[in-house]
Image (cartoon, rainbow, N blue to C red):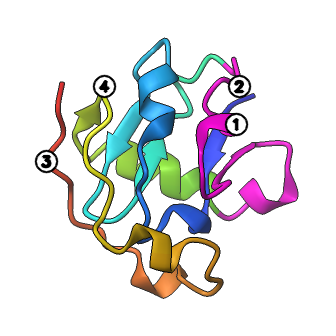
Amino acid sequence: MTYVVTENCIKCKYQDCVEVCPVDCFYEGENFLVINPDECIDCGVCEPECPAEAIVPDSDDRADEWLEVNRAFSEKWPNITRKGDQLPDSDEWKDKPGKKELLSDKPGVGNT
């Protein structure tokens, strides 16, 4: 089992989850974070830290379409091991539905 970042993270990217991850399995895109499912140890400490409630276990139905998104982008994007700045308009985008088409495939800057 693994945890999965879902649509709620798009255009928010708060990064509180990154601070608590014991195995540094988060990867950063321009406007989204992902979890590498092969590195996640299923500890669950990231889930309650996300202000956007964007992280769910892969057993949750909301994870179905996002597991492969997380896997694919974690192989391309830079690793992130500490909290950076959230996006400037994060609070405006938090909890807005229908953001999937806004997901950028561009990498973030990373910060290992």
Rounded to the nearest angstrom, the CA distance separating label 3 from label 2 is 25 Å
| 45, above or below 32, in the image | above
**Magenta: main secondary structure:** loop
Dots 1 and 2: beta carbons under 8 Å?
Answer: yes
- Of label 3 and label 1, which has the lower sequence position? 1
**Type of the residue with mark 3:** Val
Which mark's residue is nearer the viewer, 1 or 4? 1
Q: Which residue range is magenta in the image?
A: 42-65
Q: Give residue 82's position: percent from left, percent from top.
A: 30, 27
Name the residue type under label 4. Thr
Q: Secondary structure at mark 2?
A: loop
Left or right, 74 with respect to 56, comes to left
Relative placement, left or right, of 22 versus 110 is: right
Q: CA distance from mark 4 to mark 2?
A: 16 Å
**Is tag 3's residue or tag 4's residue first in the polypeptide sequence?**
4
Q: Which disc number belongs to residue 81?
A: 4
Which residue is label 3 attached to? 109
**In 3D space, how far apart are the residues under numbered discs 3 and 1 (Cα atoms)?**
25 Å
Between discs 4 and 2, the one toward the N terminus: 2
